[in-house]
Image (spheres, grey):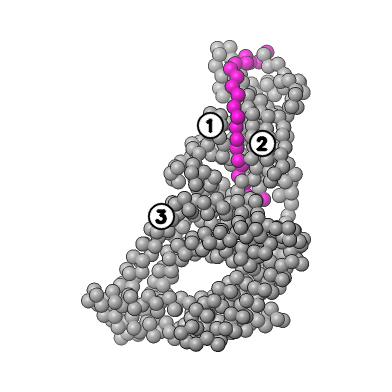
């Protein structure tokens, strides 16, 4: 399905009624004539955020098959019994279960960057009865629904009636309501099947979070959900090649990979290890798109700060053009990947990660008691890598310091995940590791620039331009890298002091 497809919009006016499983429908013959009957088997998967923001704001999003209107349906609140419905055709293949971007955009104001995941599946046996007027035209449709809801392995069944106006008016709906109520079929308290299905879970979602008493699974699940939400919400901007969203999604991808690794002992690794591999693949594509933009910005600033005598020719234009070509090529590769079944499978797997988290039994322990062991291990891994980097020879020092940065990132993300539970001290340690990653990140950027400059210089020579300034920049990056690494060591010492406190 075309991602840019515009949803079909319509207004429906309907009312739901509560009825027992074996209760007869009250006679409506004095108001309308009962017309044709049709029976359908419907299957619908409802999507919402983990804390049910859509349901709490009177919105429902579902993927339904069966009946005469299979497709994606988004219902938005209107006046009284009326609602706006937006519909798109069913997605198929590897994208079958992924929410269309056009529908997510319609609820972005409500959900922000929260992820949309399957929350319940409803199977409905529907008998549709046309309610006709004196001339035989349809005034309304009466739906007699027997519903079975399945959520996380548990089932619940109920029966309900639904009256939807076709050509009839509000007065007709009120008269039908009076007759049904007189026959023991009152208006339902649930405004939608989703609300009925979620029951107590909806009330729980409205309660304020209590992170200090949360389980390990809850704390990690919330952190993972936040990252998946970023990937989903910023996908359109990533496709458009916007630099900052590409960076944000890349960071969220790193956070996901790192969390699945750091806390792997409380996860089902048969599920999460392959997912880490796929996240690495996607992060590589994002990096290839973002790095040229970062390098171009860095080099542009460096050239601007050079003395006039050190700038020979239109070096800034040449560098911009060469790196822009790299970025454009990388972005085309990223787009091709995002249109592939592999990317769609990744999106589906991330959705399932949040909907059905693959936690083991130990994840049920209180996070406040369980998390410190993981955090201490992450800290030790950074300090161990730092010790090796200090001893490394010049040729090996680059990779060794890169490993320090990677492990500092892992520690930072672990402490970030724990901060809502462990409080301000954890947030302070996360910030300390962030300073380490930032300073060593500058050193890494300088190393990347030095890797790029010889090729850019060769291209300048081939075009008959001077490469003198490229050499000046190469030397400058070496000096900046050394300075940034010194700053990184100071940040490492500060972090070590904090954790050993």
Of label 1 and label 3, which has the lower sequence position? 1
Q: Which residue is mark 1?
A: 69
Where the C terminus falls, by quadrant?
bottom right
Q: Is residue 79 visible?
A: yes
| Magenta residues (range) | 30-51
Element marked by disc 2: helix
Picture disc at residue 193: 2
Secondary-structure class at tag 3: helix
- Of badges 1 and 3, nearer the viewer stands 3
Residue 248 is situated, as x and y percent measured from the top left of the image, at 52, 63
Numbered label tally: 3
Whole-percent x, y for residue 27 in the image? 70, 16
Quick check: marks 2 and 1 in contact, CB under 8 Å? no
In front: mark 3 or mark 2?
A: 3
Q: Earlier in the sequence, mark 2 or mark 1?
A: 1
Q: Residue at x 67, y 32 (%)?
A: 147
Find the distance from the CA under tag 1 to the CA under tag 3.
Answer: 32 Å
Q: Which residue is mark 3?
A: 336
Q: Residue at x 64, y 37 (%)?
A: 122
Q: Earlier in the sequence, mark 3 or mark 2?
A: 2
Residue 114 can be seen, yes or no: no
Q: Is residue 45 magenta-colored?
A: yes
- The quarter of the displayed image where residue 325 is located: bottom left
Badge 1 marks a residue whose secondary structure is: loop
């Amino acid at each position: 399905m075309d991602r840019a497809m515009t949803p079909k919009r319509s207004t429906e006016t309907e009312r739901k009624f509560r009825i027992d499983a074996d209760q007869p429908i009250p006679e409506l013959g004095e108001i309308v004539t009962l017309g044709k009957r049709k029976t359908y088997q419907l299957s619908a998967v409802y999507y919402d955020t983990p804390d049910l923001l859509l349901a709490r704001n009177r919105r429902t999003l579902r993927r339904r098959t069966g009946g005469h209107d299979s497709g994606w349906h988004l219902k938005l609140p209107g006046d009284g019994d009326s609602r706006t419905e937006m519909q798109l055709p069913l997605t198929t293949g590897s994208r079958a279960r992924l929410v269309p971007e056009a529908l997510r955009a319609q609820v972005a104001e409500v959900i922000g960057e929260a992820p949309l995941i399957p929350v319940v599946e409803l199977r409905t046996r529907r008998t549709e009865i046309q309610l006709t007027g004196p001339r035989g035209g349809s005034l309304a449709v009466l739906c007699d629904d027997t519903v079975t809801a399945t959520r996380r392995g548990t089932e619940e069944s109920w029966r309900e009636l639904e009256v939807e106006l076709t050509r009839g008016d509000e007065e007709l709906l009120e008269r039908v309501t009076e007759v049904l109520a007189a026959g023991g079929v009152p208006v339902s308290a649930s405004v939608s099947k989703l609300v009925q299905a979620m029951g107590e879970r909806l009330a729980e979602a409205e309660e304020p979070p209590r992170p200090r008493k949360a389980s390990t699974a809850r704390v990690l699940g919330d952190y993972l959900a936040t990252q998946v939400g970023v990937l989903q919400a910023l996908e359109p901007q990533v496709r458009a090649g916007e630099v900052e969203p590409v960076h944000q999604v890349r960071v969220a991808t790193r956070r996901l990979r790192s969390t699945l690794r750091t806390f792997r002992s409380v996860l089902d690794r048969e599920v999460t290890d392959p997912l880490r591999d796929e996240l690495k693949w996607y992060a590589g594509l994002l990096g290839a798109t973002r790095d040229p933009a970062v390098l171009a910005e860095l080099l542009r600033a460096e050239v601007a700060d050079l003395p006039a005598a050190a700038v020979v020719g239109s070096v800034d234009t040449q560098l911009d053009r060469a790196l822009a070509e790299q970025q454009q090529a990388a972005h085309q590769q990223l787009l091709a990947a995002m249109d592939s079944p592999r990317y769609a499978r990744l999106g589906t797997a991330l959705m399932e990660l949040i909907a059905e988290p693959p936690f083991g039994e130990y994840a049920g322990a209180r996070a406040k008691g369980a998390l410190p062991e993981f955090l201490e291990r992450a800290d030790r891994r950074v300090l161990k890598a730092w010790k090796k980097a200090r001893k490394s020879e010049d040729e090996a020092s680059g990779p060794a310091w890169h490993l320090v940065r990677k492990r500092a990132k892992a520690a930072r993300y672990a402490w970030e995940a724990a901060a809502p539970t462990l409080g301000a001290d954890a947030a302070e340690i996360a910030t300390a590791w962030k300073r380490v990653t930032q300073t060593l990140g500058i050193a890494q950027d300088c190393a990347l620039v030095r890797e790029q400059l010889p090729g850019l210089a060769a291209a300048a020579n081939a075009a008959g331009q001077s490469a003198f300034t490229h050499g000046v920049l190469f030397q400058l990056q070496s000096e900046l890298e050394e300075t940034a690494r010194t700053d990184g060591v100071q940040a490492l010492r500060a972090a070590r002091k904090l954790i050993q406190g």
